[in-house]
Image: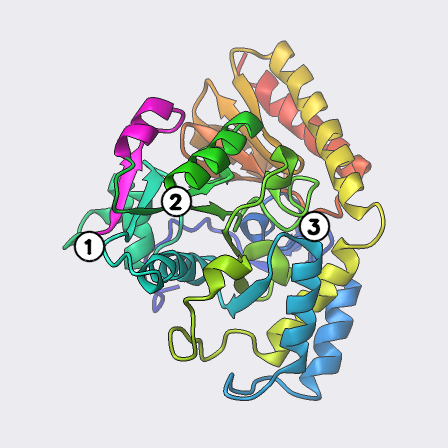
Amino acid sequence: MKSVLNTYNRRNIQFVRGKGSYLYSSNGKKYLDFVQGIAVNSLGHCHPNLVKAINKQSKKLWHVSNVFKIQEQEKLATRLTKATFADFVAFQNSGAEATELAIKIARKYHYAKGHKNKNRILCIQNSFHGRTLATIFASNNKNSVEGFGPKVEGFDHFEFGDHKELEKKITKKTAAIMIETILGEGGIKVIPDVCLKGLRKLCDKKNILLILDEVQCGIGRTGKFFAFEYAGIKPDIVPIAKGIGGGFPLGACLMSKKVAKGMTPGSHGSTFGGNPLAMTVGNAVLETLLTKNFLKNVETKGNYFQNKLKLIQLMYPNVIEEVRGRGLLIGLKLCVSQPKFIELLLKEKLLVVKAADNVVRILPPLTVSNQEIDIAIEIIKKVCKSFK
């Protein structure tokens, strides 16, 4: 890939075909794909419903400007609002764009109420909200921001789990608290339900908006449509992407009626966001995702997978320190070399992806079978044994 900008440490492997939980390389080898584009292919590769929907829509209309009404957009927005806390949806192309919009909505909400200096967003240090200038400084990871100054102002930070620092950092200028419900790139760190409930109460008390970034952990990944549903709370704004498009570039920002009031015509836009082809794919994903017992089965399979992984952890505590996650968003905190562990899994034809804190992320499609989980378990067990 000589002409492609070198911003990835790519593996020397090329895939030419995918089906369900599997990928097939250019040299004919078959791999169990538990990366799925990093939690993107929610229904696996080439799901028949998505293939059918794309083929049908591609013969009708691909793109039309948002200066016109788009019926597929209204259909998907209605589905999302009926299934969630939200009253309104704004469609984007990616998680970073959706998060940027979340920041804009929070600031504009307070501005419209006459609080022009209430514009700072409080985030977790070393989190991950995207790779635009605003989102990298919202995340404040040293490796991400280095060399991209001057600093984009308007963000404050607290350490994960430090409740005292969180409250201390809140000022009269704080507009919102923005966190990932489950930190993905940060090491599959689950925000406890009790903490989410506490955050909601704190935000209400301080007149602060609560933004929950569910780009990676949302859209059924945990066995609920959104991960925060386990805590029984309602956020004000939620950026999503990844799984909603099932592999097609699609993002969105969901919000309550209260916070949407400041966003008037001209305050935001997107050339490609919400075009008919993308909306058709999103609708096809939800048609499957919202069928009876689908999400319950995801939760069940997640518990099945994690329980088996915890047994391996007990067998090899010198290799696996902790099993993290919820549903089919799973992390293995390792005691050994993460790159070596991933390389050994690759040799056994199991694909996973790294995260911070020496964690390996395991992200199978939501359609994964117990048989495929068992295959992965045997491979992980074999790799753990090799470290003894």
Amino acid type at circle 3 is: Tyr
Please give the range of residues in magenta. Answer: 153-169
Amino acid type at circle 1 is: Phe
Q: Which residue is mark 3?
A: 22
Observer-nearest residue: 22 or 101?
101
Residue ID at (75%, 81%): 56
Residue ID at (47%, 30%): 359
Number of marks drawn? 3
Q: Is residue 277 above or below residue 47?
A: below
Image position, residue 59 (x, y; %): 71, 87
Residue 159 magenta-highlighted: yes
Location of residue 257 (image quadrant):
bottom right
Q: Nearer the viewer, mark 2 or mark 3?
A: 2
What mark, if any, has residue 148 been given in the picture? 1
Quadrant containing the C terminus in the rendered view: top right
Label 1: how many Cα within 10 Å (few below 14, some 14–19, many 20+): few
Which SS class for mark 3?
Answer: strand
Question: Mark 2 and mark 1 in contact (Cβ < 8 Å)?
Answer: no
Location of residue 2 (image quadrant):
bottom left
The residues tagged by marks 1 and 3 sit, at their Cα atoms, a distance apart of 38 Å
Residue ID at (70%, 40%): 223
Which SS class for mark 1?
Answer: loop
Q: Which residue is mark 2?
A: 207
